[in-house]
Image: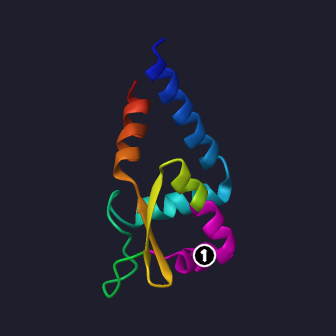
Amino acid sequence: MLNIEITNLDKMAQVFKALSNLNRLRIFYRLATCCEPGTVGIIDSLDSHRYVGELGEELNIGKSTVSHHLKELKRVGLIRTERKGQKIACWVDLEMIKQLRFFFSL
């Protein structure tokens, strides 16, 4: 087995470990289903970002807990974030979705 394959398997193991937590899976699923992967989540026609506090309210998870889980999802490359003043916008990383599709298509 090539080193690159071992590295990719290690990366996938980290992704699956992150998603094994129910709250992280719920957050990732919400972000993945609210919009096209790679674009910022849409809350309504007036706002084009999914923010940490709003995710917490929707999923009934405290803001600090949401922030903790988003940090882990970001660490493994599942999501991206961007600070917008006092808020943090977040969305699913399109490249990671492509990698997951490739992994499951083998």
Q: Say left or right for 2 vs 95.
A: right
Q: Say left or right for 31 vs 52.
A: left
Query: Residue 92, located in which quarter of the rendered image?
Result: bottom left
Quarter of the C terminus within the rendering: top left
Q: Is residue 62 magenta?
A: yes
Q: Say left or right for 10 vs 35.
A: right
Query: Residue 89, located in which quarter of the rendered image?
Result: bottom left
**Residue 97 coordinates in the image, percent (x, y):** 39, 46
Element at badge 1? helix
- The residue to which callout 1 is attached is 56
| Magenta region | 50-70
Residue drawn at 56 percent across, 62 percent down: 27
- The main secondary structure of the magenta stretch is helix
**Residue 46 coordinates in the image, percent (x, y):** 32, 88
Q: Nearer the viewer, residue 86 or 101?
A: 86
Q: Is residue 8 magenta?
A: no
Asked if residue 64 shows in the view, the reply is yes
Local packing at callout 1 (Cα closer than 10 Å; few below 14, some 14-19, many 20+) is some
Residue drawn at 45 percent across, 14 percent down: 2
